[in-house]
Amino acid sequence: MIDNPCTFFVPGPTWVRPEILEEMTRPMIGHRSAEFKALFSGIRPGLRELFGTTGEVFVATSSGTGLLEAALINCVGRRVLVTTCGAFSERWLSIAQKLGLEVDRLDTEWGEAVSPDRLADHLEGRQQHYDAVTITHNETSTGVINDVESLARVVQEESPGSLILVDAVSSLAGAPMSCDAWGIDVCVSSTQKGIALPPGIAVFSVSERAFEVARERPYRGTYFDFLEFQKNAALDSVPFTPSVPHFYALARQLRDMAAETLPVRFERHRAMRALTLERTARYATPMAKLEFASPTVSALRPHRGDSEVLRSRMKKRGFTLGGGYGKWKELCFRIGHMGDISLEALSSMLDVLGEEAEQ
Ligand SMILES: *Cc1c(COP(=O)(O)O)cnc(C)c1O
């Protein structure tokens, strides 16, 4: 049995249960074999449930960023609007710029969520058409969750021809996602965050509308060509050699999530947010405005002392926390409370954090 007590509270990768690590030690199978087809077809219904879609869902052997780039390559010919509120939502921006796309940005102050009203103002009556608008569901650098449903509705009303591309890397499986109901065209997630697998694969959903746009694109790249994923998925397969051990782990994790049930899982995440904010309030201030505080990650600034010193003290006590990210690197530390972490494990860590912070 692999020994893996939960002492790891980084906002990705997250703590992985021993049972999941165990799954990854299964014997190898060929990715064109009947066994693999059975494995992959068993995974897809659970993924559909997570994404809230009856449409196409896929697994790529890459981290999430590969799929953010893929979404832009497959879906954007020319112009894209990027909504930002922190370092991860800005990643869309840098990818789009490197691809040579025409990029507009709607910036929001770090710590706040993107405002649907401001998005509406930006889109209202614009002459130029956006091929797509990007939204980051959960901004991992600031611990803010965006209201994707309202933002997507604004795009549909003000710019109905634009595809909606969503980064749900640090929210999927930790907060509800309803791609069909909300009209999301491409939704991307890594699996080392809310899905709590070791890093190495990423999952995504693609709408019919996005496939239609992709079909018209002269160049979709090779490794992440959405149409190749679609063609292969029809045969319960994937375009290139996948990380088979991760597929075993994902199959197991989806079964275990179904047993926990998604509503219970989401409630556990909300409870972890509440516990974290309540137990740290005496000695730290959340970087996120409370109304936007994320259920999967909290960025916290200690009232006294240096957050890096606090983090290294915690390390000596056996607990790993996340550091600040991007321009907030020095300013705060982050607690990842997502995936399979229990309230009990979080509470034990917060006991120790309280001792160290209030010394
Ligand atoms: C972690 C993270 C990413 C980057 O994902 P990788 O799997 O490391 O490529 C992108 N967006 C958000 C919101 C994240 O939290």
Image: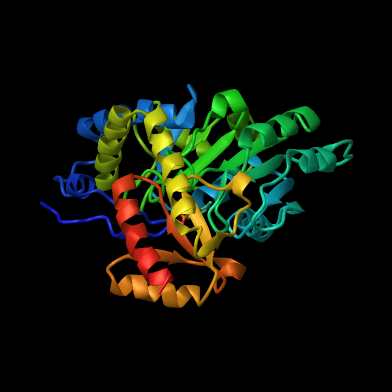
User: 214 or 110: nearer the eye?
Assistant: 110
Q: Is residue 31 left or right of residue 1?
A: right
Q: Position of residue 42 (x, y in %)?
A: 29, 28
Q: Can residue 335 be seen from the camera position used here?
A: yes
Tell me the quarter of the image containing the C terminus: bottom left
When the figure is inspected, residue 180 is found, relative to residue 280, above or below; the finding is above
Q: Position of residue 290 (x, y in %)?
A: 60, 49
Name the outermost residue toward the left.
1
When the figure is inspected, residue 236 is found, relative to residue 319, above or below; the finding is above
Residue 256 falls in which quadrant of the image? top left
User: 310 or 149: nearer the eye?
Assistant: 310
User: 209 or 172: nearer the eye?
Assistant: 172
When the figure is inspected, residue 282 is found, relative to residue 229, above or below; the finding is below
When the figure is inspected, residue 167 is found, relative to residue 86, above or below; the finding is above
Instruction: Write the residue at 37% across / 25% down.
Output: 45
Q: Is residue 342 left or right of residue 86?
A: left
Instruction: Write the residue at 78% across / 33% down.
Output: 159
